[in-house]
Image (cartoon, rainbow, N blue to C red):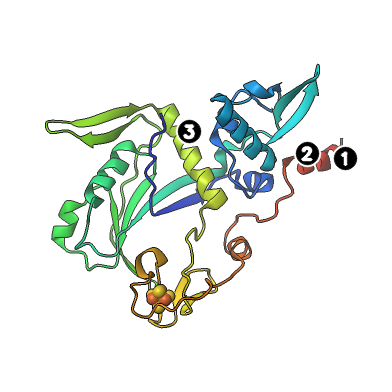
Amino acid sequence: MNPGRRIIDICGVVPGSSFDTRSMITDERIPERAIAGPAGVGTSVRRSDAVDASPQTTKAVIEQALAADFFTIEHHNGYEHIRQTTRYPTEWFDRIIGIENKPDLKRPGELTRQLQVDISLGLFDAVILATKTHVTRAHLNRIPDAVGVWQFNPDTDNRTIIRQPAELATGTPGIELGSDQSDHTEIHPVSSKEKTRARRRIAERAYGKGWRNYTLPSCAHAETQPDGRPYCTEFDCVINPAQSCDTECPAHTHAEPPQYNKAKVRDARSPWNHDPPGARYRQSGLDRFK
Ligand code: SF4
């Protein structure tokens, strides 16, 4: 089971006590199956047994973990063995905040349901709804009580906290709401161990790929701001390309998307390390002092 597959709009990861250790290993995502599998720092296992998955998935996970410098290969008795290069720093993230971005509450779609799923499962420490809409009492009545509400104007960066989110129980079992049948809703219990793994998977995904992770528009009016946010010079505002930019935009003028060094901007604006030394390098550096 893989709880919480639904993708949230924005995932905020609050660094924990061992964030620096994590940031030294790799700037990429470390696959959860490599972290939780049988290969450890003190345990090398045959390559075919290094991950608890199908042969195809095992191959893909090993390649990804090797590229991330989290696995290394050793040879014993003519066979390749896999070992973790370093102990995974489980305390590298403290809290995970899920933010649903719904600019227009007049078109809520599946919003209430999505928020109920998030609250019931409890993978995030807090869930927040961010909207540009003026929030009324009627809106609040449709949003689960545990969900925090922000009114946010992306043009001015002005944020008003309408309601604080509740702290969710991430360390206890949760319930994943399934599809609605005519007379009942399917539910799937999720153990606290599964939640721990799912949270780590979410945090790793955010660490590896999750910053300003959208396609910039192929439009001559698109720019990036110094902080990396996409900006439209025609309408003088920050844009969400997925919502604002397509060929139906009356001012769309086809051009190459704007270029910017995302890794450099992210490195400068967050504790994420674009070019870490890697676990093995760090280890060999320490070996010099033995
Ligand atoms: S597609 Fe429209 S909104 Fe997007 S950058 Fe171009 S002009 Fe601006």
The image quadrant that residue 226 belongs to is bottom right
Label 1 residue SS: loop
| Res 155 seen here | no
Q: Please name the amino acid that badge 2 sits on.
A: Gln
Badge 3 amino acid: Arg
The residues tagged by marks 2 and 3 sit, at their Cα atoms, a distance apart of 26 Å
Residue underneath mark 2: 283
Query: Which residue appears at 23% of the width and 45% of the height?
Result: 113
Q: Earlier in the sequence, mark 3 or mark 1?
A: 3
SS at mark 3 in the image: helix
Residue 289 place in picture, x, y as percent: 87, 39
In-front residue for pair 189/269:
189
- The residue at which mark 1 appears reads as 288
Locate the N terminus by quadrant: top left
Q: Which residue is mark 3?
A: 197
Q: Nearer the viewer, mark 2 or mark 3?
A: 3
Give how far across and how far down residue 110 sits, in percent: 24, 50
**Residue beneath the point at 78% across and 27% down:** 74
Label 2 CA crowd tier, 10 Å (few <14, some 14–19, many 20+): few
Three-letter amino acid code of the residue under disc 1 = Arg
Q: Residues within 10 Å of mark 3 (few under 14, many from 20)?
A: some
**Residue 178 image point, x, y percent:** 27, 34
Identified at 41% across, 50% down, the residue is: 97
Which corner quadrant of the image does residue 70 belong to? top right
